[in-house]
Protein backbone atom coordinates (compact mmCIF):
# COMPACT_ATOMS: atom_id res chain seq x y z
CA UNK A 1 0.00 0.00 0.00
CA UNK A 2 1.42 3.39 -0.95
CA UNK A 3 1.09 6.67 0.99
CA UNK A 4 -1.87 7.92 -1.05
CA UNK A 5 -3.83 4.69 -0.49
CA UNK A 6 -3.09 4.71 3.23
CA UNK A 7 -4.49 8.26 3.58
CA UNK A 8 -7.33 8.01 1.05
CA UNK A 9 -10.09 7.79 3.63
CA UNK A 10 -8.95 10.80 5.64
CA UNK A 11 -10.13 14.38 5.46
CA UNK A 12 -7.84 16.83 3.63
CA UNK A 13 -6.55 18.29 6.92
CA UNK A 14 -5.85 14.88 8.46
CA UNK A 15 -4.33 13.66 5.20
CA UNK A 16 -1.90 16.61 5.22
CA UNK A 17 -0.97 15.92 8.84
CA UNK A 18 -0.43 12.24 8.11
CA UNK A 19 1.84 13.06 5.21
CA UNK A 20 3.96 15.30 7.46
CA UNK A 21 4.22 12.54 10.08
CA UNK A 22 5.19 9.93 7.52
CA UNK A 23 7.73 12.33 6.00
CA UNK A 24 9.25 12.95 9.43
CA UNK A 25 9.52 9.22 10.09
CA UNK A 26 11.18 8.80 6.71
CA UNK A 27 13.75 11.49 7.48
CA UNK A 28 14.44 9.90 10.85
CA UNK A 29 15.07 6.54 9.19
CA UNK A 30 17.39 8.18 6.66
CA UNK A 31 19.25 9.93 9.46
CA UNK A 32 19.76 6.67 11.30
CA UNK A 33 20.88 4.99 8.10
CA UNK A 34 23.65 7.51 7.45
CA UNK A 35 24.93 7.41 11.02
CA UNK A 36 28.35 5.77 11.29
CA UNK A 37 28.01 2.14 12.33
CA UNK A 38 30.58 0.93 14.81
CA UNK A 39 31.28 -1.41 17.62
CA UNK A 40 33.06 0.48 20.37
CA UNK A 41 35.92 -0.89 22.39
CA UNK A 42 36.29 -0.04 26.08
CA UNK A 43 39.32 1.86 27.38
CA UNK A 44 41.08 -0.13 30.03
CA UNK A 45 43.03 2.38 32.15
CA UNK A 46 42.29 5.88 33.43
CA UNK A 47 45.54 7.17 31.94
CA UNK A 48 44.38 6.10 28.49
CA UNK A 49 41.06 7.85 28.96
CA UNK A 50 42.62 11.29 29.50
CA UNK A 51 43.09 12.80 26.03
CA UNK A 52 45.22 15.84 26.85
CA UNK A 53 47.30 15.27 29.99
CA UNK A 54 49.55 18.24 29.08
CA UNK A 55 46.57 20.59 29.45
CA UNK A 56 46.07 20.49 33.20
CA UNK A 57 45.75 24.25 33.80
CA UNK A 58 43.42 26.31 31.57
CA UNK A 59 45.19 29.55 32.51
CA UNK A 60 48.30 28.39 30.62
CA UNK A 61 46.47 28.58 27.29
CA UNK A 62 47.94 31.49 25.31
CA UNK A 63 46.60 30.79 21.82
CA UNK A 64 43.76 28.99 20.08
CA UNK A 65 43.61 28.06 16.41
CA UNK A 66 40.59 26.61 14.66
CA UNK A 67 40.62 25.50 11.02
CA UNK A 68 37.23 24.66 9.57
CA UNK A 69 36.25 23.41 6.13
CA UNK A 70 33.42 24.68 3.95
CA UNK A 71 32.02 21.73 2.00
CA UNK A 72 30.01 23.91 -0.39
CA UNK A 73 32.91 26.21 -1.33
CA UNK A 74 35.62 23.58 -0.79
CA UNK A 75 37.72 26.11 1.13
CA UNK A 76 39.48 26.20 4.48
CA UNK A 77 38.68 28.93 7.01
CA UNK A 78 41.47 29.51 9.54
CA UNK A 79 40.70 31.36 12.76
CA UNK A 80 43.21 32.22 15.46
CA UNK A 81 43.36 34.19 18.69
CA UNK A 82 46.68 34.79 20.40
CA UNK A 83 48.20 36.87 23.17
CA UNK A 84 50.85 39.19 21.78
CA UNK A 85 52.69 41.77 23.86
CA UNK A 86 50.19 41.39 26.66
CA UNK A 87 47.26 42.09 24.31
CA UNK A 88 44.84 39.57 22.81
CA UNK A 89 44.55 39.88 19.03
CA UNK A 90 42.98 38.04 16.10
CA UNK A 91 45.67 37.32 13.46
CA UNK A 92 42.95 36.02 11.15
CA UNK A 93 41.48 39.54 11.23
CA UNK A 94 44.69 41.56 10.82
CA UNK A 95 45.42 41.54 14.56
CA UNK A 96 42.17 43.22 15.57
CA UNK A 97 42.01 43.54 19.40
CA UNK A 98 40.21 40.61 20.99
CA UNK A 99 38.25 40.37 24.22
CA UNK A 100 39.47 36.81 24.57
CA UNK A 101 40.70 36.08 28.08
CA UNK A 102 37.47 34.57 29.41
CA UNK A 103 36.48 33.02 26.08
CA UNK A 104 39.80 31.21 25.67
CA UNK A 105 39.75 30.09 29.30
CA UNK A 106 36.30 28.56 28.72
CA UNK A 107 37.55 26.74 25.61
CA UNK A 108 40.63 25.41 27.41
CA UNK A 109 38.60 24.39 30.45
CA UNK A 110 36.43 22.24 28.19
CA UNK A 111 39.52 20.16 27.36
CA UNK A 112 41.02 19.95 30.84
CA UNK A 113 40.48 16.39 32.09
CA UNK A 114 38.57 15.53 28.89
CA UNK A 115 38.11 11.76 28.83
CA UNK A 116 37.38 9.42 25.96
CA UNK A 117 34.26 7.32 26.55
CA UNK A 118 35.41 4.58 24.21
CA UNK A 119 37.34 3.81 21.03
CA UNK A 120 35.17 3.44 17.93
CA UNK A 121 37.92 2.61 15.42
CA UNK A 122 41.68 2.32 15.01
CA UNK A 123 41.59 2.29 11.20
CA UNK A 124 42.59 5.30 9.05
CA UNK A 125 40.04 4.06 6.53
CA UNK A 126 37.28 5.13 8.94
CA UNK A 127 38.43 8.72 9.28
CA UNK A 128 36.16 9.87 6.46
CA UNK A 129 33.20 7.91 7.83
CA UNK A 130 33.42 9.60 11.23
CA UNK A 131 34.31 13.04 9.82
CA UNK A 132 37.76 13.29 11.41
CA UNK A 133 39.94 13.92 8.35
CA UNK A 134 42.36 16.70 9.17
CA UNK A 135 41.64 19.97 7.28
CA UNK A 136 45.09 20.08 5.74
CA UNK A 137 45.35 21.40 2.15
CA UNK A 138 48.05 18.82 1.42
CA UNK A 139 45.80 15.97 2.52
CA UNK A 140 42.44 17.03 1.13
CA UNK A 141 41.52 15.67 -2.30
CA UNK A 142 38.76 16.98 -4.64
CA UNK A 143 35.35 15.54 -3.74
CA UNK A 144 36.55 14.29 -0.38
CA UNK A 145 34.00 14.28 2.46
CA UNK A 146 34.30 13.73 6.17
CA UNK A 147 36.64 16.66 6.83
CA UNK A 148 36.49 17.82 10.45
CA UNK A 149 37.50 20.95 12.36
CA UNK A 150 41.05 21.18 13.69
CA UNK A 151 41.47 22.61 17.22
CA UNK A 152 44.89 23.55 18.57
CA UNK A 153 45.78 25.17 21.91
CA UNK A 154 49.32 26.30 22.80
CA UNK A 155 50.97 27.87 25.82
CA UNK A 156 53.01 31.10 25.88
CA UNK A 157 56.17 29.28 24.79
CA UNK A 158 54.43 27.77 21.77
CA UNK A 159 54.19 24.25 23.19
CA UNK A 160 51.15 22.34 21.94
CA UNK A 161 48.81 21.53 24.82
CA UNK A 162 46.04 20.04 22.68
CA UNK A 163 45.65 19.33 18.97
CA UNK A 164 42.72 17.30 17.69
CA UNK A 165 40.02 17.02 15.02
CA UNK A 166 36.34 17.26 15.92
CA UNK A 167 34.21 15.10 13.66
CA UNK A 168 30.56 14.18 13.34
CA UNK A 169 28.04 14.13 16.15
CA UNK A 170 26.87 10.76 17.41
CA UNK A 171 23.11 11.14 16.97
CA UNK A 172 22.13 7.59 17.79
CA UNK A 173 19.58 7.16 20.57
CA UNK A 174 21.40 7.43 23.88
CA UNK A 175 20.77 5.53 27.04
CA UNK A 176 18.79 6.99 29.92
CA UNK A 177 22.02 7.69 31.77
CA UNK A 178 23.27 9.82 28.85
CA UNK A 179 20.24 12.10 28.56
CA UNK A 180 21.12 15.62 27.48
CA UNK A 181 24.73 14.88 26.55
CA UNK A 182 26.31 15.86 23.22
CA UNK A 183 28.66 13.19 21.94
CA UNK A 184 31.24 13.73 19.21
CA UNK A 185 33.74 11.62 17.35
CA UNK A 186 37.26 13.04 17.73
CA UNK A 187 40.80 12.11 16.78
CA UNK A 188 44.10 13.41 18.11
CA UNK A 189 46.04 14.94 15.22
CA UNK A 190 48.68 12.61 13.85
CA UNK A 191 47.10 9.52 15.41
CA UNK A 192 44.72 6.92 14.02
CA UNK A 193 42.35 6.03 16.90
CA UNK A 194 38.88 7.62 16.80
CA UNK A 195 37.28 8.31 20.16
CA UNK A 196 33.81 9.19 21.32
CA UNK A 197 33.74 12.07 23.82
CA UNK A 198 31.28 14.37 25.49
CA UNK A 199 32.31 17.92 24.52
CA UNK A 200 30.61 21.29 24.18
CA UNK A 201 31.67 22.45 20.72
CA UNK A 202 30.09 25.90 21.17
CA UNK A 203 33.18 26.82 23.20
CA UNK A 204 35.23 26.57 19.99
CA UNK A 205 33.38 29.20 18.04
CA UNK A 206 34.90 30.97 15.05
CA UNK A 207 32.27 33.71 15.08
CA UNK A 208 34.13 37.01 14.95
CA UNK A 209 31.67 38.73 17.26
CA UNK A 210 32.16 36.07 19.95
CA UNK A 211 35.78 37.16 20.43
CA UNK A 212 35.62 40.96 20.37
CA UNK A 213 34.10 43.89 22.19
CA UNK A 214 30.78 43.85 20.34
CA UNK A 215 29.57 47.30 21.37
CA UNK A 216 31.18 49.55 18.77
CA UNK A 217 30.21 53.06 19.89
CA UNK A 218 29.85 52.43 23.63
CA UNK A 219 27.11 55.00 24.06
CA UNK A 220 23.82 55.09 25.93
CA UNK A 221 20.79 55.83 23.73
CA UNK A 222 19.35 57.98 26.51
CA UNK A 223 22.33 60.35 26.24
CA UNK A 224 21.75 61.15 22.56
CA UNK A 225 21.04 64.87 22.35
CA UNK A 226 20.78 65.52 18.62
CA UNK A 227 21.18 63.97 15.18
CA UNK A 228 22.25 65.29 11.81
CA UNK A 229 21.29 63.05 8.89
CA UNK A 230 23.30 64.04 5.83
CA UNK A 231 21.85 61.97 3.00
CA UNK A 232 23.90 62.05 -0.18
CA UNK A 233 25.37 59.66 -2.73
CA UNK A 234 28.49 59.54 -4.86
CA UNK A 235 28.20 58.78 -8.56
CA UNK A 236 30.82 58.31 -11.27
CA UNK A 237 30.40 60.84 -14.11
CA UNK A 238 32.35 60.85 -17.39
CA UNK A 239 33.43 64.26 -18.59
CA UNK A 240 35.90 64.99 -21.38
CA UNK A 241 37.08 61.41 -21.45
CA UNK A 242 37.76 61.41 -17.72
CA UNK A 243 35.73 59.71 -15.02
CA UNK A 244 34.95 62.01 -12.12
CA UNK A 245 33.06 61.46 -8.88
CA UNK A 246 30.05 63.66 -8.28
CA UNK A 247 28.30 64.22 -4.97
CA UNK A 248 24.52 64.20 -5.26
CA UNK A 249 22.97 65.84 -2.20
CA UNK A 250 19.52 64.64 -1.17
CA UNK A 251 18.66 66.07 2.24
CA UNK A 252 20.16 67.47 5.43
CA UNK A 253 18.00 66.94 8.52
CA UNK A 254 18.78 68.20 12.03
CA UNK A 255 16.87 66.69 14.95
CA UNK A 256 16.88 67.32 18.70
CA UNK A 257 15.68 64.94 21.41
CA UNK A 258 14.18 66.29 24.65
CA UNK A 259 14.46 63.50 27.20
CA UNK A 260 12.25 65.36 29.68
CA UNK A 261 9.30 65.28 27.29
CA UNK A 262 10.57 62.15 25.49
CA UNK A 263 9.99 63.94 22.21
CA UNK A 264 11.86 64.61 18.94
CA UNK A 265 11.76 68.02 17.32
CA UNK A 266 12.87 69.19 13.89
CA UNK A 267 15.65 71.75 14.01
CA UNK A 268 16.54 71.89 10.32
CA UNK A 269 15.23 70.44 7.08
CA UNK A 270 16.97 71.08 3.79
CA UNK A 271 16.46 69.35 0.47
CA UNK A 272 18.66 69.90 -2.56
CA UNK A 273 17.73 70.76 -6.09
CA UNK A 274 19.82 70.27 -9.22
CA UNK A 275 23.37 71.49 -8.69
CA UNK A 276 23.18 70.64 -4.98
CA UNK A 277 21.46 73.93 -4.15
CA UNK A 278 19.91 73.81 -0.65
CA UNK A 279 16.25 74.57 -0.21
CA UNK A 280 14.87 75.00 3.29
CA UNK A 281 11.61 73.23 4.03
CA UNK A 282 9.11 72.91 6.85
CA UNK A 283 6.77 70.11 7.75
CA UNK A 284 3.49 70.28 5.88
CA UNK A 285 0.24 70.40 7.84
CA UNK A 286 -0.33 66.71 7.17
CA UNK A 287 3.25 65.64 8.05
CA UNK A 288 4.96 64.70 11.30
CA UNK A 289 8.23 63.19 12.50
CA UNK A 290 8.38 59.38 12.42
CA UNK A 291 9.21 59.13 16.12
CA UNK A 292 9.15 55.34 16.07
CA UNK A 293 11.91 55.12 13.43
CA UNK A 294 13.93 57.82 15.17
CA UNK A 295 13.71 55.91 18.44
CA UNK A 296 14.77 52.76 16.60
CA UNK A 297 17.74 54.66 15.18
CA UNK A 298 18.77 55.90 18.61
CA UNK A 299 18.45 52.44 20.16
CA UNK A 300 20.37 50.85 17.28
CA UNK A 301 23.27 53.23 17.94
CA UNK A 302 23.41 51.99 21.51
CA UNK A 303 23.54 48.39 20.32
CA UNK A 304 25.57 48.75 17.13
CA UNK A 305 27.60 45.60 16.62
CA UNK A 306 30.28 44.92 14.04
CA UNK A 307 30.43 41.70 12.07
CA UNK A 308 33.83 42.19 10.46
CA UNK A 309 36.77 44.60 10.18
CA UNK A 310 39.54 45.51 7.75
CA UNK A 311 42.63 47.55 8.48
CA UNK A 312 42.73 51.05 6.98
CA UNK A 313 45.79 52.26 5.06
CA UNK A 314 48.27 54.45 6.89
CA UNK A 315 48.16 58.18 6.26
CA UNK A 316 44.76 58.84 7.82
CA UNK A 317 44.67 60.67 11.13
CA UNK A 318 42.49 59.60 14.03
CA UNK A 319 40.12 62.39 12.96
CA UNK A 320 39.85 60.74 9.52
CA UNK A 321 41.66 63.50 7.71
CA UNK A 322 43.88 62.46 4.83
CA UNK A 323 47.45 63.67 5.04
CA UNK A 324 48.78 65.60 2.04
CA UNK A 325 50.81 62.65 0.74
CA UNK A 326 47.85 60.28 1.13
CA UNK A 327 46.16 61.35 -2.11
CA UNK A 328 49.32 60.40 -4.02
CA UNK A 329 49.37 56.90 -2.54
CA UNK A 330 47.49 54.96 -5.23
CA UNK A 331 47.24 51.77 -3.15
CA UNK A 332 45.83 53.64 -0.15
CA UNK A 333 43.32 55.59 -2.25
CA UNK A 334 42.24 52.37 -4.00
CA UNK A 335 41.68 50.73 -0.61
CA UNK A 336 39.35 53.60 0.32
CA UNK A 337 37.50 53.68 -3.00
CA UNK A 338 36.87 49.94 -3.03
CA UNK A 339 35.03 50.32 0.25
CA UNK A 340 33.06 53.38 -0.79
CA UNK A 341 35.13 56.27 0.60
CA UNK A 342 36.64 59.13 -1.37
CA UNK A 343 39.56 61.09 0.15
CA UNK A 344 39.71 64.69 -1.15
CA UNK A 345 42.76 66.87 -1.67
CA UNK A 346 41.56 69.14 1.15
CA UNK A 347 41.76 66.23 3.58
CA UNK A 348 38.03 65.56 3.92
CA UNK A 349 36.49 62.17 3.18
CA UNK A 350 33.20 61.62 1.36
CA UNK A 351 31.31 58.35 1.50
CA UNK A 352 29.10 56.48 -0.95
CA UNK A 353 25.94 56.69 1.10
CA UNK A 354 26.14 59.77 3.28
CA UNK A 355 26.68 60.33 6.99
CA UNK A 356 24.94 60.24 10.34
CA UNK A 357 26.23 62.60 13.02
CA UNK A 358 25.30 61.84 16.63
CA UNK A 359 25.65 64.47 19.35
CA UNK A 360 25.85 63.34 22.98
CA UNK A 361 25.12 65.13 26.24
CA UNK A 362 28.75 64.84 27.33
CA UNK A 363 30.04 66.90 24.38
CA UNK A 364 31.18 63.93 22.29
CA UNK A 365 30.03 63.84 18.68
CA UNK A 366 30.20 60.69 16.55
CA UNK A 367 30.52 60.85 12.77
CA UNK A 368 29.43 57.69 10.94
CA UNK A 369 30.24 57.51 7.23
CA UNK A 370 28.56 54.78 5.17
CA UNK A 371 30.44 53.02 2.38
CA UNK A 372 29.61 50.23 -0.07
CA UNK A 373 27.81 46.98 0.63
CA UNK A 374 29.76 43.77 1.19
CA UNK A 375 29.22 40.25 2.47
CA UNK A 376 30.81 38.45 5.39
CA UNK A 377 31.33 34.71 5.38
CA UNK A 378 31.58 33.05 8.77
CA UNK A 379 29.80 30.62 11.01
CA UNK A 380 26.12 30.23 10.37
CA UNK A 381 23.71 32.07 12.70
CA UNK A 382 23.42 30.42 16.08
CA UNK A 383 19.80 29.45 15.68
CA UNK A 384 16.95 29.46 13.20
CA UNK A 385 15.42 32.54 14.80
CA UNK A 386 18.42 34.55 13.67
CA UNK A 387 17.94 33.36 10.11
CA UNK A 388 14.30 34.37 10.18
CA UNK A 389 15.07 37.71 11.76
CA UNK A 390 17.61 38.65 9.13
CA UNK A 391 16.57 37.44 5.66
CA UNK A 392 19.92 38.53 4.25
CA UNK A 393 21.70 35.91 6.35
CA UNK A 394 21.64 32.37 5.06
CA UNK A 395 22.41 28.99 6.53
CA UNK A 396 25.87 29.02 5.01
CA UNK A 397 26.82 31.90 7.30
CA UNK A 398 27.05 34.63 4.65
CA UNK A 399 25.72 37.95 5.94
CA UNK A 400 25.07 41.11 3.93
CA UNK A 401 26.94 44.04 5.44
CA UNK A 402 27.97 47.64 4.93
CA UNK A 403 31.37 49.32 5.36
CA UNK A 404 31.49 52.01 8.00
CA UNK A 405 34.06 54.64 8.98
CA UNK A 406 33.70 56.03 12.50
CA UNK A 407 35.33 58.94 14.24
CA UNK A 408 34.63 61.03 17.33
CA UNK A 409 35.14 64.75 17.91
CA UNK A 410 34.47 67.31 20.61
CA UNK A 411 31.59 69.71 19.97
CA UNK A 412 31.41 72.49 22.54
CA UNK A 413 27.85 73.41 21.52
CA UNK A 414 26.64 70.10 23.01
CA UNK A 415 27.69 71.18 26.51
CA UNK A 416 25.58 73.75 28.29
CA UNK A 417 27.87 76.58 29.34
CA UNK A 418 27.62 77.74 32.95
CA UNK A 419 25.51 80.81 33.72
CA UNK A 420 27.64 82.94 36.00
CA UNK A 421 25.87 85.22 38.48
CA UNK A 422 26.74 88.95 38.40
CA UNK A 423 28.94 90.20 41.26
CA UNK A 424 27.29 92.57 43.78
CA UNK A 425 28.45 96.17 43.39
CA UNK A 426 30.68 97.43 46.17
CA UNK A 427 29.51 100.54 48.14
CA UNK A 428 30.81 103.58 46.27
CA UNK A 429 29.79 106.52 48.40
CA UNK A 430 32.32 109.39 48.39
CA UNK A 431 34.49 107.54 45.82
CA UNK A 432 33.73 109.91 42.96
CA UNK A 433 33.39 113.27 44.76
CA UNK A 434 35.47 116.15 43.35
CA UNK A 435 38.50 117.10 45.44
CA UNK A 436 37.18 120.65 46.05
CA UNK A 437 33.88 119.33 47.42
CA UNK A 438 35.71 116.93 49.68
CA UNK A 439 37.86 119.78 51.00
CA UNK A 440 34.75 121.97 51.59
CA UNK A 441 33.02 119.15 53.45
CA UNK A 442 36.14 118.59 55.56
CA UNK A 443 36.27 122.32 56.49
CA UNK A 444 32.58 122.30 57.35
CA UNK A 445 33.08 119.25 59.53
CA UNK A 446 35.93 120.95 61.38
CA UNK A 447 33.80 124.04 61.95
CA UNK A 448 30.95 121.94 63.25
CA UNK A 449 33.34 120.10 65.57
CA UNK A 450 34.62 123.44 66.90
CA UNK A 451 31.12 124.89 67.28
CA UNK A 452 29.32 121.94 68.75
CA UNK A 453 30.02 119.89 71.81
CA UNK A 454 31.59 116.47 71.20
CA UNK A 455 29.07 114.41 73.27
CA UNK A 456 26.13 112.79 71.39
CA UNK A 457 27.27 113.89 67.97
CA UNK A 458 30.48 111.82 68.21
CA UNK A 459 28.50 108.71 69.21
CA UNK A 460 26.15 109.14 66.28
CA UNK A 461 29.07 109.54 63.90
CA UNK A 462 30.75 106.43 65.29
CA UNK A 463 27.52 104.44 64.95
CA UNK A 464 27.08 105.56 61.34
CA UNK A 465 30.66 104.62 60.58
CA UNK A 466 30.12 101.16 62.07
CA UNK A 467 26.95 100.65 60.04
CA UNK A 468 28.72 101.74 56.85
CA UNK A 469 31.57 99.35 57.54
CA UNK A 470 29.13 96.50 58.29
CA UNK A 471 27.30 97.09 55.02
CA UNK A 472 30.56 97.16 53.10
CA UNK A 473 31.64 93.92 54.79
CA UNK A 474 28.29 92.27 53.95
CA UNK A 475 28.64 93.31 50.31
CA UNK A 476 32.20 91.96 50.28
CA UNK A 477 31.10 88.60 51.74
CA UNK A 478 28.24 88.35 49.25
CA UNK A 479 30.65 89.14 46.45
CA UNK A 480 33.04 86.45 47.65
CA UNK A 481 30.16 83.94 47.88
CA UNK A 482 29.08 84.65 44.31
CA UNK A 483 32.70 84.37 43.15
CA UNK A 484 33.00 80.96 44.86
CA UNK A 485 29.75 79.74 43.27
CA UNK A 486 30.83 80.97 39.85
CA UNK A 487 34.20 79.32 40.27
CA UNK A 488 32.54 76.00 41.14
CA UNK A 489 30.30 76.27 38.07
CA UNK A 490 33.24 77.09 35.82
CA UNK A 491 35.39 74.29 37.22
CA UNK A 492 32.54 71.78 36.78
CA UNK A 493 32.17 72.89 33.15
CA UNK A 494 35.91 72.73 32.56
CA UNK A 495 35.93 69.17 33.93
CA UNK A 496 33.19 68.21 31.48
CA UNK A 497 35.24 69.68 28.63
CA UNK A 498 38.33 67.76 29.75
CA UNK A 499 36.25 64.58 30.09
CA UNK A 500 34.81 64.98 26.59
CA UNK A 501 38.22 65.61 25.04
CA UNK A 502 39.66 62.59 26.86
CA UNK A 503 36.80 60.36 25.74
CA UNK A 504 37.20 61.53 22.13
CA UNK A 505 40.87 60.61 22.30
CA UNK A 506 40.07 57.16 23.73
CA UNK A 507 37.38 56.45 21.14
CA UNK A 508 39.51 57.52 18.22
CA UNK A 509 42.34 55.32 19.43
CA UNK A 510 39.93 52.41 18.87
CA UNK A 511 38.48 53.67 15.59
CA UNK A 512 41.63 55.03 13.94
CA UNK A 513 42.97 51.90 12.24
CA UNK A 514 39.82 50.19 11.05
CA UNK A 515 37.09 49.95 8.50
CA UNK A 516 34.13 48.38 10.24
CA UNK A 517 31.38 46.25 8.75
CA UNK A 518 27.87 46.30 10.21
CA UNK A 519 24.97 44.18 9.04
CA UNK A 520 22.71 45.59 6.34
CA UNK A 521 19.84 45.25 8.77
CA UNK A 522 21.53 47.57 11.29
CA UNK A 523 22.63 49.94 8.54
CA UNK A 524 19.00 50.36 7.47
CA UNK A 525 18.13 51.52 10.99
CA UNK A 526 20.85 54.15 11.38
CA UNK A 527 20.83 55.51 7.81
CA UNK A 528 17.61 57.45 7.26
CA UNK A 529 16.66 59.98 4.61
CA UNK A 530 13.69 62.32 4.43
CA UNK A 531 11.25 59.50 3.65
CA UNK A 532 12.38 57.62 6.77
CA UNK A 533 12.24 60.60 9.12
CA UNK A 534 8.97 62.22 8.03
CA UNK A 535 5.62 60.50 7.70
CA UNK A 536 2.01 61.42 6.94
CA UNK A 537 -0.21 62.08 9.93
CA UNK A 538 -2.84 59.51 10.63
CA UNK A 539 -6.27 60.77 9.69
CA UNK A 540 -8.56 61.24 12.64
CA UNK A 541 -11.63 59.07 12.55
CA UNK A 542 -14.70 61.06 11.49
CA UNK A 543 -17.40 61.20 14.15
CA UNK A 544 -20.76 59.85 13.11
CA UNK A 545 -23.66 62.42 13.07
CA UNK A 546 -25.84 62.35 16.17
Image (cartoon, rainbow, N blue to C red):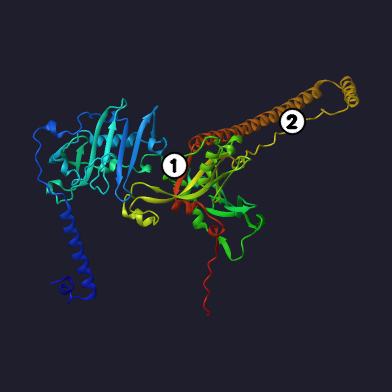
User: Can you tell which mark lies on residue 426?
Assistant: 2
**Residue at the limit of the structure toward the bottom, as seen here:** 546
User: Residue 261 or 300: which is nearer the viewer?
Assistant: 300
Q: Quadrant of residue 410?
A: top right
Q: Which mark is first along the chain, 1 or 2?
A: 1
User: Can you tell which mark lies on residue 337?
Assistant: none
User: Residue 262 or 42: which is nearer the viewer?
Assistant: 42
Picture layout, residue 5 above or below residue 403:
below
Rate crowding at label 1 as few (under 14), some (14 to 19) or many (20 or more) other CA atoms within 10 Å: some
Q: Position of residue 370 (x, y in %)?
A: 52, 48
Q: Quadrant of residue 534?
A: bottom right
Picture layout, residue 330 above or below residue 428:
below
Closest to the camera, between mark 2 and mark 1, is 1
Lateral position of residue 462 relative to residue 150, left or right: right
Q: Quadrant of residue 411?
A: top right
Q: Position of residue 1 (x, y in %)?
A: 12, 72
Q: Position of residue 258 (x, y in %)?
A: 55, 50
User: Residue 291 or 151: which is nearer the viewer?
Assistant: 151
Residue under label 1, please give it. 309
Rate crowding at label 2 as few (under 14), some (14 to 19) or many (20 or more) other CA atoms within 10 Å: some
Q: CA distance from mark 2 to mark 1?
A: 64 Å
Lateral position of residue 348 relative to residue 447, left or right: left
Picture layout, residue 147 above or below residue 439:
below
Q: What element does badge 1 sit on?
A: strand
Q: Residue at left 10%, top 32%?
A: 45
Q: What element does badge 2 sit on?
A: loop
Lateral position of residue 124 relative to residue 510, left or right: left
Q: Position of residue 128 (x, y in %)?
A: 20, 45
Amino acid sequence: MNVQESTAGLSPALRKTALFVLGGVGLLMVGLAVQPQFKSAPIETQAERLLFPELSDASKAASLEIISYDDELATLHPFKVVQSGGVWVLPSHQNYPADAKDQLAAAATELVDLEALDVVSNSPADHETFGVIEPDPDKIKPGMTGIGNLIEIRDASGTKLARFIIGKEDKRPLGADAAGRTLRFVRKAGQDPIYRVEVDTTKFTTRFDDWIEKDLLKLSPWDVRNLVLDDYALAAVESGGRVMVEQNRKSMIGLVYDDKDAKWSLEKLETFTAGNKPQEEKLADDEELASGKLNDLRNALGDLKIIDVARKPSGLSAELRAEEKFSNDREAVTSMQQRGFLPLQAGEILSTDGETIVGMKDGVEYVLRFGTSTSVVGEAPKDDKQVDADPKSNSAGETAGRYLLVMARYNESLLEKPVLDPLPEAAAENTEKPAEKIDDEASADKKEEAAEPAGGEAAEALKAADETEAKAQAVLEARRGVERDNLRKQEAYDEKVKGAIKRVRELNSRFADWYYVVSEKEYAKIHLGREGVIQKKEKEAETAPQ
